[in-house]
């Protein structure tokens, strides 16, 4: 803040990982996301959770989205870009 007081930060939630919503890694990520969401002050730090964009209706994470159930594939990076585009544009104003 001292070097760039007008800088805004878009803090993305940790993306889902592992296949099922009840998997230990997914539960742990949800707990971390709940903690980091509190950094959102509506002014300089803005938290955004787009994880649902990568999941099926029942919360399953498929290998067609993240082949290793951790890292996005090329098509999923486009989903991410589309999901944050509007928020980034609003922060850039």
Image (cartoon, grey):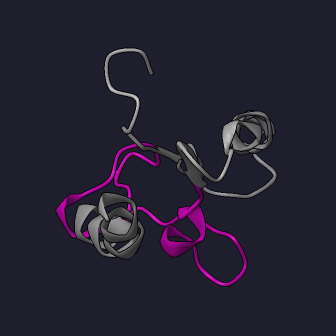
Q: Position of residue 29 (x, y in %)?
A: 69, 38
Residue at left 64%, top 53%?
42
Residue 81 in which image quadrant: bottom left
Residue at left 68%, top 45%?
41
Residue 4 in which image quadrant: top left
Q: From this view, report whether residue 56 is shown above or below residue 63.
A: below
Residue at left 77%, top 40%?
38
Q: Answer whether residue 74 is magenta in the image.
A: yes
In the image, taking residue 73 as reference, residue 54 lies left or right, namely right
Query: Looking at this rendering, what residue extends furthest in the bottom direction?
Result: 57
Residue toward you, 79 or 74: 79
Q: From this view, report whether residue 3 is shown above or below residue 13.
A: above
* Range of magenta residues: 48-76
Q: Quadrant of the N terminus?
A: top left
Query: Looking at this rendering, what residue extends furthest in the left direction?
Result: 74
Residue at left 81%, top 52%?
22
Q: Position of residue 87 (x, y in %)?
A: 42, 68
In the image, taking residue 55 as reference, residue 4 lies left or right, namely left
Q: Answer whether residue 82 is magenta in the image.
A: no
Residue toward you, 79 or 55: 79
Residue 71 shows in the view: yes
């Amino acid at each position: 803040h001292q070097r760039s007081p007008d800088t805004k930060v878009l803090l993305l939630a940790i993306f889902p990982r592992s296949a099922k919503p009840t998997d230990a890694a997914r539960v742990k990520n949800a707990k971390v996301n709940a903690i980091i969401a509190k950094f959102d002050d509506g002014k300089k730090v803005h938290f955004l959770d787009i994880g649902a964009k990568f999941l099926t209706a029942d919360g399953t994470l498929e290998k067609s989205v993240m082949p290793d159930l951790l890292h996005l594939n090329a098509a999923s990076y486009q989903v991410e870009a589309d999901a944050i585009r509007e928020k980034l544009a609003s922060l850039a104003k």
